[in-house]
Amino acid sequence: MSFSSLLREENKMTKFQDLGLKEDILKGLDDLGFEEAFPIQEAVIPVLLTGRDVVGQAHTGSGKTAAFSLSMLQEIQPKNGIQGLIMAPTRELAMQITDEIKKFGKHTGIRVATVYGGQGMGVQLDALDRGVEIVVATPGRLIDHLKRGSIELRDVSHIVLDEADTMLDMGFVDDISFILDLAPEDRVMSLFSATMPTEILRLSEEYLKNPKQFLLDADDLSGEGIDQSYLVIKDRDKFKYLIDFIKPTKGQAIVFCSTKYRTRDVAKFLHQEKFDAVAIEGDMSQHRREQSMGKFRSGKADILVATDVASRGIDVPRVELVINYDVPNQEMAYFHRIGRTARAGAKGKAVTFVSYSSVGDWNIIKRQIKVPIKDLNEEMGIEIAIPDPLKRQMPSRRYGGQSRSNYSRGGRSGGYGRSGGRRDSRDDRGGRRRYNDRGGNRNHYGGRSRW
């Protein structure tokens, strides 16, 4: 049993009013129906309020947004310029954080602006001109504002790096260093990450002062509270089984695909089958992405089909089912995907479709899962037709923390296409063109874009 589960079971959770938060913040929490703090909030908020830096390792959905934002709202003064800065890897996560802070700070008079690539600079400039105290930003667009002088960091007293490992994966470490070098040294800083690779630890050592470290809910990376299962099938049979799993679902569902091409195909198929589905992938305009997310969050769409760009930017309590239409290419991506269900202690279900060529990758992920996981082939009486030599071995090669099967994932529309040297997948983070939060063609160093 996890630390958080034990606390819940014994009804020993600390109430927010016991953490020393201001009355106007408590009023906002009361409006949301929040009375008791999650373990990460109970641990982190008092430390940040003393002015000490924090490094927190916690899985998605553990409540870390409230942990860093409530302590920030406590210390920031209205109408005193930009005092709080939060950096996030994707526009979806940045927008989600902004929405949460606005709810928590509803009665404080503190204003928040979000800056990210893909949205017109004019919209963001207007918001900044009206005066804000907290900025939530993706690193690339933040640098654009810093260089044009529309954002200054001289009064910033609180800085947060959220999902630091994802920012590392997306190549933002240099950008983060550039930004932090411009910020005042006298500040309270926190860094949150689901994993702690060496470069993240180096970053914390360089920019955080004597941080208190919290390893909270690490065992929940196994997916405790989520009914996990998998099905080994032929790639061409996935459409059929997708319908079989979605039909009985009463709540909302998210279908994660490996590439933007696959995402489009699955969304089109669901529309043809008369399901209310929306899609989100890297090549969509920001307006269309916001439309899709708006429909899904409001409940007007029952199904969201997405690439991994959405795996850390969705907090929808009604998500009952997550389907991994394709096996993710990183172990941690699996846990971030399934973490979209079972939010805030609720129950959820996650099903992974394993094509024959992905068995090796799936076996690597499965070894990291610490709770029972169902083999649906046995339960449903579906035979696996993998040739015996392939079934026995299915070797995997590992490159830089990612697992790569020796066998093709099915070409351009069928997965990652990694057999041979040419990479077919040009999705939101991989291939030649990486996910760009800047919305432009130049990088901040003045040369050709590396995106």
Image: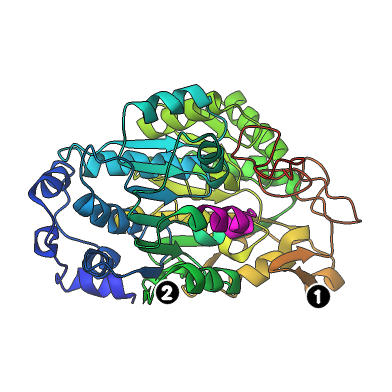
Figure check: 322 above or below 265: below
Residue 379 seen in the current view? no
Q: Residue at x 49, y 36 (%)?
A: 149
Q: Tell me the amino acid under the disc marked 1.
A: Gln
Quadrant of the image for the N terminus? bottom left
Q: Position of residue 90 (x, y in %)?
A: 53, 45
Q: Position of residue 211 (x, y in %)?
A: 37, 74
Q: Which residue is mark 1?
A: 393
Quadrant of the image for the C terminus? top right
Q: Residue at x 35, y 53 (%)?
A: 343
Q: Which residue is mark 2?
A: 219
Residue 446 seen in the current view? yes
Looking at the rendering, the stretch of residues picked out in magenta corresponds to 167-179
Q: Position of residue 440 (x, y in %)?
A: 66, 32
Marks 2,1: beta carbons within 8 A: no
Task: Using residue 89 as the reference point, say whether residue 15 is left or right of it.
Answer: left
Nearer-the-camera pick, 348 or 174: 174
Mark 2 and mark 1 lie on one chain; the one further toward the N terminus is 2
Q: How many marks?
A: 2
Q: Quadrant of residue 71?
A: bottom left
